[in-house]
Image (cartoon, helix red, strand yellow):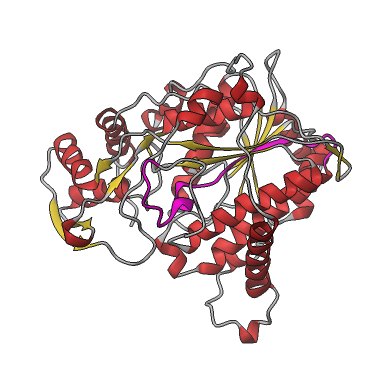
Amino acid sequence: MSKQMSHLDHISSTPGKFKMEKSPYIQNRLRWHSSPAKLTFWSFIFLGLILIFFFRSPSSNPLPQDPSRRSLRAYNWGGPAWEKRVRYSARVRSRNGVSVLVTGASGFVGTHVSAALKRRGDGVLGLDNFNDYYDPSLKRARQSLLERSGVFIVEGDINDLALLRKLFEVVAFTHVMHLAAQAGVRYAMENPGSYVHSNIAGLVSLLEACKSANPQPAIVWASSSSVYGLNNKVPFSERDRTDRPASLYAATKKAGEEIAHTYNHIYGLSLTGLRFFTVYGPWGRPDMAYFFFTRDILKGKSIPIFEAANHGTVARDFTYIDDIVKGCLAALDTAEKSTGSGGKKKGPAQLRLYNLGNTSPVPVSDLVSILEKLLKVNAKRKIMKLPRNGDVQFTHANISLAQRELGYKPSTDLQTGLKKFVRWYLSYYSGGKKATG
């Protein structure tokens, strides 16, 4: 198990803070040029979703109940010993360090970001509800990794406003890295309520706690490349239209961007949204194609290779986790302070939105070919039509804005990144462990 737990100790993520010269681009950051009518439309959308899923009576609710995702479980928190652990984990240990609350800390990106922050001396406190969207044992293994490096993960739900307020009472966080979310495009067809609960109501709960905190923290949060939806213009730019989502997951992330705009405008919260493009790597999510392709190739099972209409190629802008971590830390390091106090705005606050991708889309069939070589096993490919379940034909990030303002420069190609993933996978699932699914 020592091999399994040592991977994050050697991640080549940013060791120190990004230092930047002020430039015209910094002074003129991207703003959403939304009309009042558009903002009102999206406000009604997300408020309507919340009302539909959370305020109708149980007898009129046709959706299957899922207590782990639709409502708050009973979590044990509070007390002197608990507060001591919270303070110790969040204590800054470097001269210019910051204190960061990382939500979704036992998730794929959350674990890597938390480890990188801790390594450079920042104070880090995690928050996660350890739900069972995928195998919770993988999340617990990530938790063990972080505990070894001194990161305490509070077990709780981002919709628990009392817990959030308590955390801000115990620690004056300078920053929040909000990575907690209900992920996955296809699962939204099975459990739509979980997406509203986590991605909309959860975001509102977090922002409510942040607006009332004194001082207000600067917030960096995970949006998604899925917001580009049915957009045919490539590469995807932050200025492109995002009003045609192809999935409920994408719709909730788009709603999140409008909610962020609202809290920035009314309460002076500093908010930076990051649109991630198909993140992969060690300790990844089992529901991602590269992960379950690896599992099924090794098991001799057939794997689905989707193709679009007229035998069109399906491609993704695969982005290695180390590159994503560097982008996240750069966003934190360039985030300006929120301008509100006591829930009241004192002046204009920073509002930003960036693509974090690799800019080199790769056909999914090429991904499978790389895995075959690394695993030394031929895949049983099953060519299938791209289903109408929220998947899109391609993703391709224009990262010029992130390059200019964050110094973001992805450096890991798919061959190199998958090699690192396969090495981790074979180590983690050896010794009696079984692949999830």
Q: Quadrant of residue 40?
A: bottom right
Residue at the (45%, 62%) spot, across then down: 247
In the depicted view, which residue is nearer to us: 338 or 185? 338
Residue 147 magenta-drawn? no
Q: Quadrant of the N terminus?
A: top left
Q: Residue furthest left?
A: 378
Question: Residue 198's x, y, as percent?
Answer: 60, 57
Q: Quadrant of residue 284?
A: top left
Residue at the (29%, 65%) spot, across then down: 387
In the depicted view, which residue is nearer to us: 329 or 379? 329
Residue 78 appears anywhere in the view: no
Q: Is residue 55 above or below residue 272?
A: below
Q: Is residue 423 above or below residue 223?
A: above
Please provide the residue range marked out in magenta: 213-235
Q: Quadrant of the C terminus?
A: bottom left
- Chief SS of the magenta region: loop
Residue at the (70%, 75%) spot, across then down: 55
Counting every numbered tag in the picture gives: 0
In the depicted view, which residue is nearer to us: 244 or 203? 244
Q: Quadrant of residue 185?
A: bottom left
Question: Residue 223's x, y, as percent?
Answer: 54, 46
Q: Is residue 80 left or right of residue 260?
A: right
Q: Is residue 201 above or below residue 240?
A: below
Q: Is residue 203 left or right of residue 210?
A: left
Residue 42 appears anywhere in the view: yes
Residue 219 magenta-drawn? yes
Q: Residue furthest bottom?
A: 59
